[in-house]
Image (cartoon, grey):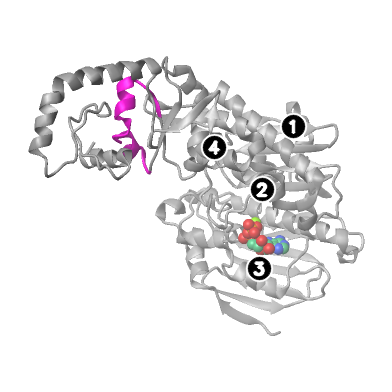
């Protein structure tokens, strides 16, 4: 096919505009993004060659390579990974097929100044345009002989052409670096020392060697250490953090790191993180989740949902198993007993870590709860095996304080004679905390849990009771909060009142003869002197309606 010039669609144009003109700091992350793409491409080729060995070129050694050229002001990032067909180039690079990038393009000013989000949005490749005024990509897909050259100045169009790639399978990205002014304080990305330190900083654990020509020979710039295979005592906080950023593209510190080796019936290493903040697209349709799966250090797949329950979808991390067969597919994973075992084990570990956080660092736990509590709670109805653990991890708003409470703490504060754990459900804290249903319980000094999340109805349904105390909605009919003694006493009081008030009530009844059927004494109201009750309707519900109409 002859060389073609095509236009980016409107969204890409917008995106490029943001990338080129609005991202000021951290320009260096382009290298991390491009290296990570090259490493992904090598992983993909490795994985596909497990079932199609002929895809691998002779004597293939997975390698990434940096080739800086000071005179030409270019930097090449080369990989011998899977490559792309021409169609794939147009699809992956030329249009925003991917919703992450679309979301980024739609983001407003505030986001524009947060380049650390760029990776999260999946606009990794475009970060090249932060430092380059022209980007050339030359690629050849494994198993084909057709090379494709793509290039663009980032100005709205790109050209695409069929050109054989001299190196065969793989991808070369050539950056024609911009001339920055001194006051921009941008590093020289053709400088060997700068490149070395950037690789150390962002890509040290990349599993394949990243090479560059040194004084005499090739130098390998990264240590390729799979930190998850080390024992936790050998890994520094800095290494954990860097690896987290690599996995999640989140520049915040992770809230908690969970790293362990499972031994016994099943052997695997797991390195997982609980983020401190929700990702921008958490709970949206395109938000992938799940752990990455490695088998004996070979990357198998990202976002493996079989390895972790949906209610732990905020967890980032990986599992490296020595038992699974390298030929796994998604279909196999879904039924594999070992995978089920891993999921169980991983779930236990995460819940255990959360419990530890709750007991040892309440403030951090409350931060966690604000971000992911509503998600974690979903497990109570959906994972009966872990119900007990999950309900112990659940925090509730309550009438007794501004701080959130656990069920255990609530039970510890229960008044003498209080039989049940009381709760009210509604749309907002403001709404439920002014509900007239609370009136009587307040008077008795009973604490009420305020439930305002969408899942809460299912949660209380599933919890049912805690430490032999029933979870009782105060909105349900027949709410019985008095002790036997109190009941007797009230009956007594009512009888006495009746004798005293009989004449008044008779007069009332007579006067209202045409309007009401009967006049009776009630102990149900506290601050409201009188209310109308319909004889045919549910009196409790009706009374509540009346009370609420009174604006309480
Ligand atoms: P992401 O890596 O999050 O998918 P990118 O913008 O970094 O987003 O890359 C977009 C897509 O382009 C990748 O998913 C991949 O399919 C393709 N791609 C990018 N770089 C390479 C490469 N070096 N080799 C093969 N495919 C690549
Ligand atoms: Mg990428």
Residue furthest right as drawn: 59
Q: Is residue 114 above or below residue 69?
A: above
Measured from the top left, where is residue 332 in percent x and y?
80, 55
Residue that numbered label 2 is attached to: 290
Q: What residue lies at 74% left-to-right and 32% top-to-bottom? A: 260
Measured from the top left, where is residue 254 in percent x and y?
59, 36
Is 438 displayed left or right of 260 in the figure?
Answer: left
- The residue lying toward the viewer, choosing from 92 and 18, is 92
The picture quadrant for ligand 1 comes to bottom right
Mark 3 or 1, nearer chain start: 3
**Quarter of the figure with residue 416:** top left
Mark 2 or 4, nearer chain start: 4
- The residue lying toward the viewer, choosing from 358 and 243, is 358
Residue that numbered label 1 is attached to: 260
- The residue lying toward the viewer, choosing from 99 and 62, is 99
Residue that numbered label 4 is attached to: 276
Q: Is residue 238 above or below residue 45?
A: above
Q: What residue lies at 45% left-to-right and 50% top-to-bottom? A: 113
Q: Is residue 520 above or below residue 107?
A: above
Estimate the spatial distance between the alpha carbons at disc 2 and disc 4, rounded to whole Å: 17 Å
Mark 2 or 3, nearer chain start: 3
Pointer 2 and pointer 4: residues touching (CB < 8 Å)?
A: no
Q: Secondary structure at mark 4?
A: loop
Q: What residue lies at 83% left-to-right and 70% top-to-bottom? A: 143
């Amino acid at each position: 096919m002859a060389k073609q010039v095509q236009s980016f669609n409107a969204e890409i144009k917008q995106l490029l505009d943001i990338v080129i003109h609005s991202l000021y700091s951290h320009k260096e992350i382009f290298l991390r993004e491009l290296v990570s793409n090259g490493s992904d491409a090598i992983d993909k080729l490795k994985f596909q060659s497990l079932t199609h060995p002929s895809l691998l070129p002779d004597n293939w050694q997975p390698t990434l390579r940096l080739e800086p050229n000071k005179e030409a002001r270019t930097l090449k990032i080369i990989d011998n990974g899977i490559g792309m067909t021409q169609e794939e180039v147009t699809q992956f690079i030329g249009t925003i097929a991917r919703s992450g990038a679309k979301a980024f393009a739609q983001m407003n000013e505030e986001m524009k100044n947060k380049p650390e989000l760029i990776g999260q949005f999946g606009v990794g490749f475009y970060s090249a345009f932060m430092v380059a005024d022209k980007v050339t990509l030359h690629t050849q897909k494994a198993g084909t002989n057709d090379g494709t050259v793509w290039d663009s100045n980032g100005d709205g169009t790109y050209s695409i052409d069929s050109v054989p790639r001299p190196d065969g399978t793989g991808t070369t990205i050539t950056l024609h670096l911009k001339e920055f002014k001194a006051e921009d304080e941008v590093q020289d990305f053709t400088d060997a020392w700068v490149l070395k330190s950037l690789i150390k900083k962002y890509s040290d654990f990349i599993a394949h060697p990243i090479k560059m020509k040194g004084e005499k020979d090739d130098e390998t710039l990264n240590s390729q250490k799979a930190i998850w295979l080390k024992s936790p005592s050998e890994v520094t906080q800095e290494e954990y953090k860097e690896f987290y950023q690599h996995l999640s593209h989140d520049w915040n510190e992770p809230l908690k790191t969970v790293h362990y080796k499972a031994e016994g019936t099943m052997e695997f290493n797991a390195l997982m993180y609980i983020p401190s903040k929700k990702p921008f697209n958490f709970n949206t349709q395109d938000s992938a989740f799940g752990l990455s799966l490695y088998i004996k250090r070979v990357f198998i797949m990202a976002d493996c949902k079989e390895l972790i329950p949906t209610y732990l979808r905020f967890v980032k991390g990986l599992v490296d198993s020595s038992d699974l067969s390298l030929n796994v597919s998604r279909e196999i994973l879904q039924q594999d007993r070992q995978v089920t075992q891993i999921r169980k084990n991983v779930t236990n570990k995460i819940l255990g870590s959360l419990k530890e956080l709750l007991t040892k660092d309440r403030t951090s736990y409350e931060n966690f709860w604000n971000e992911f509590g509503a998600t974690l709670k979903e497990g109570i109805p959906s994972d009966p095996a872990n119900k007990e653990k999950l309900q112990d991890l659940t925090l509730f708003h309550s009438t007794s304080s501004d701080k959130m409470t656990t069920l255990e703490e609530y039970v510890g504060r229960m008044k003498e004679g209080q039989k049940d754990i009381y709760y009210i459900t509604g749309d907002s804290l403001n709404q439920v905390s002014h509900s007239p249903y609370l009136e009587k319980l307040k008077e008795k000094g009973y604490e009420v849990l305020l439930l305002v999340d969408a899942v809460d109805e299912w949660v209380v349904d599933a919890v049912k009771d805690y430490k032999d105390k029933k979870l009782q909605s105060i909105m349900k009919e027949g709410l019985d909060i008095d002790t036997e003694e109190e009941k007797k006493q009230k009956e007594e009081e009512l009888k006495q009142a009746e004798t005293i008030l009989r004449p008044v009530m008779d007069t009332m009844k007579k006067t209202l003869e045409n309007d009401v059927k009967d006049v009776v004494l009630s102990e149900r109201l506290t601050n409201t002197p009188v209310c109308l009750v319909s004889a045919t309707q549910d009196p409790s519900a009706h009374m509540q309606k009346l009370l609420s109409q009174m604006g309480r």
